[in-house]
Image (cartoon, grey):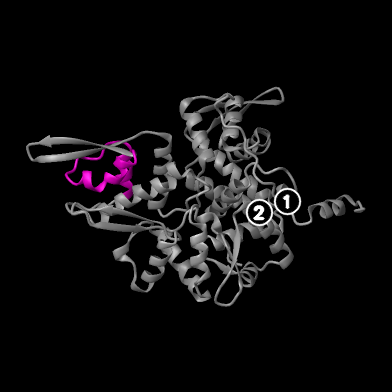
Amino acid sequence: MKKLDAAEITARCIEISKCLIGNQTGMVDYDLHSALTTGDAARFAATIRNREAKFSRESLAATSAALKINSRFTETVIVPIFDELGWVKTKYSGRNLDSIIESIPPAEDVLSTLGERWQEDSKTAIDETAVYALSRTARRPYAKDALISDLESKTKVFDAMFDYGSQAGFLGKFVAQENSKEVICSPLFWSRNADKVIEFLRKQKEPKFEQIGEIADKLRKHPGIPDDRIEKKDKGLINAGTAHGFFPSVAVNDRSGNPHEYVFASTAQFDADEKSDVFEKARMIVSCIRHGQYHAEVSHVRYPRAILRAMRSSTMSPHSYAKTQYALLLLHNIVDIVESRTYYGTTYKVVWVDTPENNLAADIADSLLAGQEVTGVSKEDLEARNILVQGIFNYSSEQRRLKMSKSVVATKEYDRLMELYGGVRV
C-alpha cells in the first residue's frame, strides 16, 4: 500500500473528525481513536494559532465548544499533545489547568507534525483503513474490490470501516451502469450537487476513474486552471464534471464582458452555509488572481501569493484594471474598490473587508495558491474565530448549543461489547 504524505494524513483525519462532530460515544471512539485525536488536535491548533498569546481555562472551554470538541478532551488529551510538541506552555492551579501560552507553528508544520504522530501511533486496522480509503477516494471513485486490493485490507475490516464512513458521511457508494459493480466514493467533495455528481460518476466507464484522478491531481497542484489552458484530452471530462458539480469553476469577465472560466478540484465542504460558503469565496479570490495572471489586459500577475498578501493588507497599488479584475470580490463583500483620479487617468485601489469569514477564505485561497492540501473548514471553525476575534470566552445565550448528529455505531456493536466483556448475549 502506497504510503501517504504526513500532511495529507492530517488533512484526512480532519475530515473524519468533522464528520463525527457531536456523535455519541461508542466503539467508534476506539476504532477511529488516532484519526479523531489527530483531526481534533489539528482543528484546535489552527483555531488558536496567533489568535491570543494566553488562553485561560475558560477561553479554552469556549473555543472547544465552538469547535464541538469536549473541553475535558481538550484539557486531558489535546493540551498534553501540544505540550509534548512544544506548542504550548501550561500553567496549573493545583491539579487543574489554569492557562496556556500558545506558540503553534505554521499550518504546514502542524499538518506534517501531527501526521507523523499518527503514523507512529498504535492504530486499529479500521483507523488506518479509513484514512487511506478517504485519501484514495478524495481523488477518484474506486470499484470496491479494487479499493480493498489497493488498501491491502481484509474484507471484514473494510466493511466495518465503510459502515462508519457511510453513516458519518465521509464515504458513499453507487452502482456503475457499465458493469453493475459497486463503486466507493467520497461524498465530502461536493456539498450541494450530490445527486448530479453521482449520476455523472455512474455513467463513467471504470478506466475514466483513473483519468478523473489524474485531472483532480493537476487541479490540486494548480487550482484555478483557466479553461483555455486545459489539455484537449481532458476537456470533455472536465466540461461534463463541471456541469454536474464535480469540478467547481468560477467565471471572471473581462472589460468586454467575455467570461473566462477557472476550474478547481472538489474541496470538502462540511455543510458550509450556502449563503456564506468560505470555500466558494476562496475560489473567487483565486480566480480573480488567476485572471490577472493569465488574462489581464494591462499587466500580468507574476507572483499570485504576493498579490493575495497585498490584497489582504490593502497595500496593493492602485490599478486601472482592478475594477474589472476584482469586481466579483466587490459583489461578494470581500473587498471594496476605491476610485482615484490622477493626472494620468482613473485608477482603482482594492481595500480588504476585514471579517473573520473573509480572512478564513483568504487562508484557504493562500493554501490553494501554494498547492497545499486544503484541510477544510466548517461553520464551527468560523464561529470559533468569531469568538476569538471578539474576545468572548464565556458561555452565553448567543453561543450555539451543541447539535447531536446521527449516532455512528460499529457493526454488531452490542455483540462485540458482549464478546469483549466476556458476556453472553441472551
- The answer to whether residue 197 is left or right of residue 23 is left
Looking at the rendered structure, the secondary structure element under dot 2 is helix
- Between residues 201 and 73, which one lies in front from this camera angle? 201
**Does the stretch in magenta take in 182?**
no
Label 1 to label 2, Cα distance in Å? 8 Å
Residue 235 found in image quarter: bottom left
For the stretch drawn in magenta, the main secondary structure is helix
- Between residues 31 and 226, which one lies in front from this camera angle? 226
Q: Amino acid at mark 2?
A: Gln
What residue lies at 51% left-to-right and 37% top-to-bottom? 47
Looking at the rendered structure, the secondary structure element under dot 1 is loop
**Labelled disc at residue 47:** none
Whole-percent x, y for residue 381 in the image: 52, 39
Q: Is residue 104 visible?
A: no
Rendered position, 271 above or below 261? above
- What residue did someone put label 1 on? 409
Whole-percent x, y for residue 165 in the image: 64, 56
- The answer to whether residue 74 is left or right of residue 55 is right
Looking at the rendering, the stretch of residues picked out in magenta corresponds to: 304-333
